[in-house]
Image (cartoon, rainbow, N blue to C red):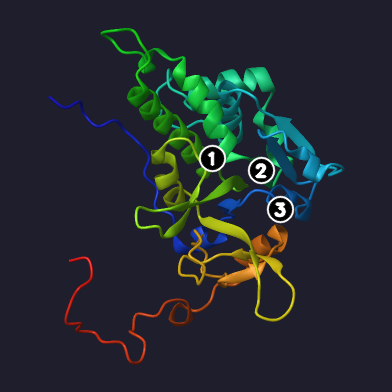
Amino acid sequence: MSPPFSKASLRIITADERLRETRGIKGVLTGTSGIGKTTQLLTLDPQRTMFVNLEAGELAVQGWPGDEVRVRDWELARDLAAWIGGPNPAMRDGQSYGQAHYARVCAAFGPASQLDKYETVFVDSISVASRICLQWCKGQPQAQSDRTGKPDMRATYGLLGQEMIGWLTHLQHTPAKNIWLVGLLDRKLDDFGKPFFSLQIEGSKTGLELPGIVDEVITLTELRPEKGEAFRAFICTTINDFGLPAKDRSGRLSMIEPAHLGRLMTKIRGPRPDSHQRLSFDLPAGANPNPTTTQGA
């Protein structure tokens, strides 16, 4: 028999209230090694930004006058996410990110009000976070075979996916803060020799689900025009000419934007284009709405 419904408050948020809310930008900044991802920290306000350093790659931003937190183990990474994001009411007391976890973290780190001065959290990098998480998962009882007691890699990677998605989802639900996750981009070849790009993250589950969790996926790349010198730029839209991973939930970004993260966030918060300018539901001129064959059918 199902338990009776408990009394829970349900409040309808009006359109005016929703439009007045200040929502943080949650995004992934990716690119190949050495392209300048970590250096984008220099474009952010050092008084309002917290640098979460997992990669020990701060040489690129040496002299940056902002605050930094160094993370070297997965327990600290989870505690920091709970401290930043607050308690998750959907979690039980014994689970990560629940009320008990948040209370323990606040007792260890101090009140979460210390974080009020930060507008942006810059995490470098999610690639290293997945490696730290994998190492932690290998030592958990769930990663051992019940029959033999030996490591079970399938269970290990299953636990890795759960931990990483839980960590990312909790950061995604952090109210009123910008969360930027830096990640390394790999260029690979498929079975037919066609190149494609994917985030360098341990395990397949996190890499597949991450674009659906965050608001923005921005790829920092080098563009080489036919005339003139090469330059770095952000690729920001899913449909782009370069086959690079990108996504823009705001509807305010062009396919190519200047490689300046601070200005990019200002544009994301800017006025939204009219609906008829932002979305087009018509086929382009000359398109055949009734093709004789359907590719992939």
Q: Which quadrant of the rendered structure holds the N terminus?
A: top left
Coordinates of residue 144 in the picture (x, y in percent): 36, 13
- Callout 3: SS: loop
- On screen, residue 287 versus residue 119, left or right, reads left
- Give 154 or 172, whichever is nearer the viewer: 154
Residue 48 disc label? none
Q: For the residues marked 2 and 1, what is the alpha-carbon distance in whole angstroms? A: 10 Å
Q: Is residue 90 visible?
A: no
Q: For the residues marked 2 and 3, what is the alpha-carbon distance in whole angstroms? A: 18 Å
Q: Nearer the observer, disc 3 or disc 1?
A: 3
Crowd around label 2: few <14 · some 14–19 · many ≥20 (10 Å): many
- The reply to whether callout 2 and callout 1 are in contact (CB within 8 Å) is yes
Please state which amino acid type lies under the numbered disc 1.
Leu
Can you tell which quarter of the image residue 14 is in? bottom left
Residue at the image position 58 percent from the left and 46 percent from the top? 184
Q: Which residue is mark 3?
A: 36
Residue at the image position 20 percent from the left and 82 percent from the top? 291
Crowd around label 1: few <14 · some 14–19 · many ≥20 (10 Å): many
Q: Which quadrant of the rendered structure holds the C terminus?
A: bottom left
Coordinates of residue 180 in the picture (x, y in percent): 61, 48
Q: Is residue 19 visible?
A: yes
Crowd around label 3: few <14 · some 14–19 · many ≥20 (10 Å): some
Q: Which residue is mark 2?
A: 121
Coordinates of residue 218 in the picture (x, y in percent): 57, 58
- Callout 1: SS: helix
Please state which amino acid type lies under the numbered disc 3.
Gly
- On screen, residue 263 versus residue 218, left or right, reads right
Residue 171 disc label? 1
Residue at the image position 45 percent from the left and 46 percent from the top? 210
Dot placed on the residue nearer the N-terminal end, 2 or 3:
3
Can you tell which quarter of the image residue 111 is in? top right
